[in-house]
Image: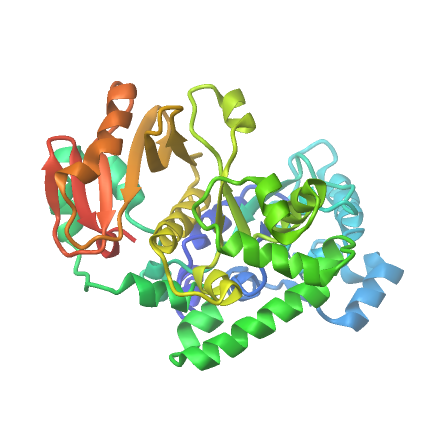
Amino acid sequence: MTIIERVNDLRTRALAEPLRVHLDTMPAVVVTGARQTGKTTLARAFAPGPRRFFSLDDFDLVEAAQRDPDSLFREGEPVTIDEIQHVPALLRTIKHRIDQDRQGGPGRPGQFLITGSANLALMAQVSESLAGRASYLTLWPMTRREQLGLGSAGRWGDLLATPDRQWPELLESEPARPADWMSVAKRGCFPHSALHFTDSRERSIWLDGYIRTYLARDLTALSSVASLVDYRRLMRAVCVRVGQVANQTEIGRDISLPQPTVHRYLNLLEASYLLLRLPAYSVSRGTRLIKSPKLYWADTGLALRLANSEPTPGHLENLVLCDLVAWRDSRLEPAEISYWRTARGAEVDFVMEAGDTLLPVEVKATTRPRLRDTTQLRAFRREYAEQSRSGLLLHAGETVEWLASDVLAAPWWRVI
């Protein structure tokens, strides 16, 4: 049985192939992502051969690792360490062992497979980045196509690789059933919640437990928070602003928190991989860094539960973005996702940037898109005529059609 077949038994993840390539290349590979995205399952199923597995969710093991970190390692034996954020000091030991093994060479690939439920680069207590010794991958919650057993993110790569005029044929060539985006948004993308609960009440109970566990344990491992009540109010305030440009002063005013506290709490949410901050597109990469990002969530089910609300068109955007970031982070070649807005009010939901190519994407919750819905996409194409592919308008209907000579309308469920 091959490695990939073993992963298929557990539903193939889009990150499986990049993980294999990275393990074949680097001495250490770090897979990060939010709790319950499937990092442990992927790490257990994918790593072949005799490999010791340690989960630092085990308090006894945490104590042993803090007391004598070398006890976890044996000479030449590959090791998987799950939830490294509980004992970040282990990274120094791993660095030392990699350096001993390298002795001027590249080192043995795949010696350390490490998972973590926090962005280690943003954790204050992490002083060792394993720079030059490790590669980093992010496992996001399950894409819709992963939930369906297809083992991939949406068809973004296929669209980039196919001439624009052939897009309708491409999208209609694969069997796909219409789906209700509101139901998909409520279900969310965490594997356990999405795959095992059909009853909304059961899913709500699971999500409530997830929130409590995050606040009580994972958050405190990241940083000291003076008031968990204030932090949860901040989470709820962000949930009701899905798809909006971040205004930290406004958020703070609404929930009676000072702007520096809002700024810090947003950073903690992002470090936990629960918050997605989408940057603004600009030809100047420096300019992107100073423009306000838009706020989204890594899981729409969690966002809706926190907000105690029904789905809005912004949650359909959020679903598409979750798929886009999973696609971006499962590619071996770099890609970027951003939004576009001008001072005059023109705006496009998402801009995919791969190499020298731009692909603008607009998301509409309507079932019957019209020519007027193409205005923003066509404005973007006029601005970036040499780089931009045809615009893609994703909608909630069932028709694939060219609304304009350079804008294709397609159902969201045929793409993601």
Q: Is residue 147 left or right of residue 92?
A: left
Q: How many marks?
A: 0
Identify the coloring: rainbow
Q: Position of residue 298 (x, y in %)?
A: 49, 54
> Toward the viewer: 262 or 3?
262
What residue is shown at x 16% (from left), y 31% (from top)?
A: 406
Q: Is residue 98 visible?
A: yes
Q: State which quarter of the image contains the N terminus.
A: bottom left
Residue 33, by quadrant, is bottom right
Q: Is residue 320 left or right of residue 250?
A: left
Q: Position of residue 398 (x, y in %)?
A: 14, 56
> Toward the viewer: 79 or 266?
266
Find the residue positioned furthest to the right: 67
Q: In this picture, is 203 found above or below 44?
A: below
Q: Position of residue 317 (x, y in %)?
A: 36, 49
What residue is shown at x 76% (from left), y 45% (from top)?
A: 126
Q: Is residue 92 left or right of residue 364?
A: right
Q: Position of residue 315 (x, y in %)?
A: 38, 55
Residue 214, by quadrant, is bottom right
Q: Is residue 384 visible?
A: no
What residue is shown at x 72% (from left), y 65% (from top)?
A: 217
